[in-house]
Amino acid sequence: MIRSLFFAVFLILAQVCIAQSKSDLQKKRDDLNRRLALTKKLIAENQNSKASVNQQMLILRQQISYREQLLSNMQREVKNIDEEITQREGEIELLEDRIAAMKREYALMIQQAYKNQKSHDALMYIFSADDFNQAYKRFKIIQNYSEVRKEQAEEIEATQVELRETIAALENDKREKTSLAEEQAKEREKLAKDKESQQKSLSQLQQQEGELKSQQEQQERERQRLNKKIEEMIAAELADEKNANNGTYALSPEGVIVSQNFEKNKGQLPWPVERGVITRRFGKQPHPTLGGITIDSKGVDFATEADAKVMAIFGGTVTSVFNIPGAGQNVIITHGAYKTVYTGLKNVSLSKGDTVSARQTIGKVLSDNGKSIAHLEIWKISSTGGTPQNPLSWIVK
């Protein structure tokens, strides 16, 4: 009895854990499928532009990464279903043992009732009592005997229903496992095609290497010009703040609160676009497809859809709006001791001094040669200047 009770408690706890894990895995699979759908759309948008072959390659690499993550997630789902099947089988064994025990007990009750009816033992049982109270209790036991039998029969039927439902759930788990295995096979085929496309794109890039290197070097010069402009704007903002505060840099009480709130949200800040694929990360890095070229990125690039909205990742005050030929409009928003920079915009609807809230639209992404890329930077400001931060440490993964 104790063993059965312990096993039942264990099954209940296991069922709760499996249900939570199953829900989390399903959410992860749905998220990865949405990301894969976006990469597919972005690659299609870039296919007609010869100048964006490299961009296609970057998005395709991310698509392959998502596909591999999806397959890994599916493998965990299969393991989860296997555990659920094992649990169901344990439940079935437990229920079958319980039903068998109840049937044995019920059979004994029927046999005893038959004997009592045949030999009038019931009356003898009552009259042989030592006193009136004991006789009354025996009378009530016999009176309630039929009710006990009825309850026992109902409990057997209820347990049998539970058993049938558990068996049906087990069969459903097995069908789900089969379906998931088929989906896995399809995803492996898609992954193989993705890698084949990647190899074709790489071959195409290698054939155009000289031309692309020239283009990339030009793009890097433009990026360096943008980096320099951003640094100049941040330095100018810092100088203005010092001039307004007798030559020193000090946050107002409100600025301190904003800075603390910004820091509390580290790792939880939203993306600057609703949907996107990260194609360039923070810091110095070799070019992903062209040898001999080093990229120095002060922020993160998000490949997104044409005319996508670009949003503030945190509430603050607009302290700069400026334009750079080839880089579109650019906005700096101050959040106490932190500044966020948004570049590659068009249709900016904000002006210096405006107050913005988190996820408020700043403008739309600028499309160039089939590419729509929003660039985000985060800077921490001190009395000596600004230090770029890795946005991936601040935004939701």
Image (cartoon, rainbow, N blue to C red):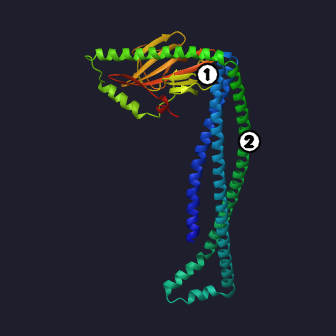
Q: Which mark is residue 185?
A: 2
Residue that sits furthest to the front in the current view:
292
Residue 305 disc label: 1
173 on left or right of 25: right
Dividing the picture into quadrants, the one containing residue 216 is top right
Nearer to me, 379 or 182: 379
Q: Residue at x 40, y 17 (%)?
A: 234
Secondary structure, mark 1, is loop
Q: Residue at x 67, y 20 (%)?
A: 53
Q: Is residue 51 above or below residue 175?
A: above
For the residue pair 288 and 273, the one nearer the viewer reads as 288
Q: Is residue 48 left or right of residue 374?
A: right
159 to the left or right of 234: right
The image shows residue 193, relative to residue 82, as above or below, that is above
Give coordinates of residue 165: x percent, y percent: 68, 57
Rendered location of residue 84, percent (x, y): 64, 54
